Amino acid sequence: MSGKSFFVDLTKCTACRGCQIACKQWNKLPAEQTRNHGSHQNPMDVSAITYKTVHMKEVADDKGFMAAWLFFPEQCRHCTEPPCKMTADAYDDTAILQDEVTGAITFTEKTKDLPDFDEIREACPYNIPRQDAATKVMTKCTMCLDRVQNGLKPACVQACPTGTMNFGDRDEMLALAEKRLAEVQKKFPDAVLGDADSTRVIYLYQMAPQKFHDFAVAAATTPGLMNRKAMFAKLFGSTSRSKA
């Protein structure tokens, strides 16, 4: 499997939100209407106009004292076999595209004509797709495909000051992730890589991924996903119509 991948080393993230801001700036996305939620995190989730947000969570020890701040810069995982595209292809195989060179998954304006947004969103094991209320166009992280095709790094990677965000050829990123995992496990024996075999955004978690975010890794039975896979297996003899 070729193409590009991110490696996100969460042990280095300081929640500066440089990646979040860079994403907004490069994609010319408007500001969110927000309020004080009693957290440093803002906004609280991705949206049709926020493709990336840094989740922040306090983790307590067994005595109830704060043991760690966990930071999770969330974005589309650009699955190697994307269930969002599998679902959309049943209606229009040009609504959601998979770039042959990079593997990036991109939503086009044709997503506004798909009959059921909830079907697309529920197919995603990471709860990523969002829909513009006015235009009905579905949106998410694009891997900054326009930048990557011109030899540049994604805006979030370019802006990261700590080395949390990395991007390059998939084999290179997998090797970097495995090397870093071995280093981190010396201090955090429970450290793992999240869904490295099935996504192009490889997160290194120093503790259980579920402590970072409910959708940090794919659930074994994501609502809607199993039905989609069964449907495509029956129709096409495979759960994927798009190869990386």
Image (cartoon, rainbow, N blue to C red):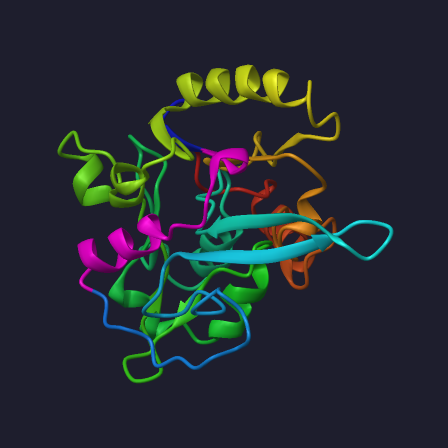
Instruction: Relative to 18, say whether 185 is above or below.
Output: above
Q: Is residue 244 something one can see in this rendering? A: no
- 233 relative position to 124: left or right: right
Task: For the N terminus, give its image quadrant.
Answer: top left
**Residue 169's x, y, as percent?**
35, 22
Query: What's the residue at 18%, 35% (across, down)?
Result: 149
Viewer-side residue, 173 vs 41: 41
**Residue 44's x, y, as percent?**
49, 69
Query: What's the residue at 47%, 52% (across, down)?
Result: 74
Magenta span of residues: 8-28
Which quadrant would residue 160 be assigned to in this image? top left
Viewer-side residue, 147 vs 212: 212
Viewer-side residue, 187 vs 204: 187
Task: For the C terminus, give its image quadrant.
Answer: top left
**Residue 29's x, y, as percent?**
23, 66
Query: What's the residue at 54%, 34% (across, down)?
Result: 11
Which quadrant would residue 193 be assigned to in this image? top right
**Residue 2's x, y, as percent?**
39, 22
Which quadrant would residue 35 be assigned to in this image? bottom left
Outermost residue on the left side: it is: 150
- 149 relative position to 14: left or right: left
